[in-house]
Image (cartoon, rainbow, N blue to C red):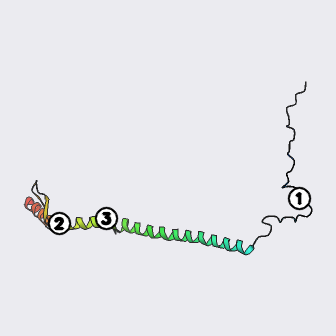
Amino acid sequence: MSHDHHQHTAHQADPADAWHTHTAAEKPQEAHAENIAHGTVLVFGIGGFAIIAATVIATIVYFDFYKTSLVAQREEGIEIQTGALAARDQVLKADFQTYGWSDPAAGKVRLKIDDGRRMVIEEYEKARR
């Protein structure tokens, strides 16, 4: 009894079909990509590099601008306001510059902020005496 652990499958191959068989009258086909247009490859290579370089530069410029504006907002107290934020701030500032009812049912009124500050200071000065 033989203990052959290396069993092999018999080689099987289909015979070549008509597409693989050529006659002597047929012209041999050229190999693909044997002749390349060096100029075209160079143009596409340089163009691709230019697109990547422009994208990197644009990204750097954008984030530098973003970083500068963020630092200005945080460190210098400069706020860049647009849209709804600016409209809300205008309403709040108008509330601090006008008189009106803040809660009519409770009898609370809204004063100009400067007048409110002055009144609070006067109250504290009276209490101190």
Give the labeled residue for mark 2.
113
| Number of on-image labels | 3
Question: Which residue is pictured at 27% across the width and 64% down the height?
Answer: 88
Q: Nearer the viewer, mark 2 or mark 1?
A: 1
Please name whichever residue, 11 or 90, is drawn nearer the observer in this view of the structure.
11
> Which numbered disc flags the more N-terminal residue, 2 or 1?
1
Crowd class of label 1 (few under 14; some 14 to 19; many from 20; radius 10 Å): few
Crowd class of label 2 (few under 14; some 14 to 19; many from 20; radius 10 Å): some
Crowd class of label 3 (few under 14; some 14 to 19; many from 20; radius 10 Å): few
Q: Nearer the viewer, mark 2 or mark 3?
A: 3
Horizontal side of 47 relative to 120 (left or right) equals: right
Residue 43 at x, y percent in the picture: 68, 74
Residue 6 at x, y percent in the picture: 85, 34
Give the labeled residue for mark 3.
84
Circle 3 — which element?
helix
Horizontal side of 62 relative to 96 (left or right) equals: right
Identify which amino acid the numbered label 3 is placed on: Ala
Q: Residue furthest right?
A: 24
Placement of 5 over or under 46, stated as above or below: above
Give the labeled residue for mark 1.
22
Q: Nearer the viewer, mark 3 or mark 1?
A: 1
Q: Is residue 110 visible?
A: no
Q: CA distance from mark 3 to mark 1?
A: 77 Å
Residue 51 at x, y percent in the picture: 59, 71
Identify which amino acid the numbered label 1 is placed on: His
Q: CA distance from mark 2 to mark 3?
A: 23 Å
Quadrant occupied by the C terminus = bottom left
Question: Which residue is pictured at 85% across the width and 54% down the height?
Answer: 18
Which mark, residue 99?
Answer: none
Q: CA distance from mark 2 to mark 1?
A: 98 Å
Identify which amino acid the numbered label 2 is placed on: Ile
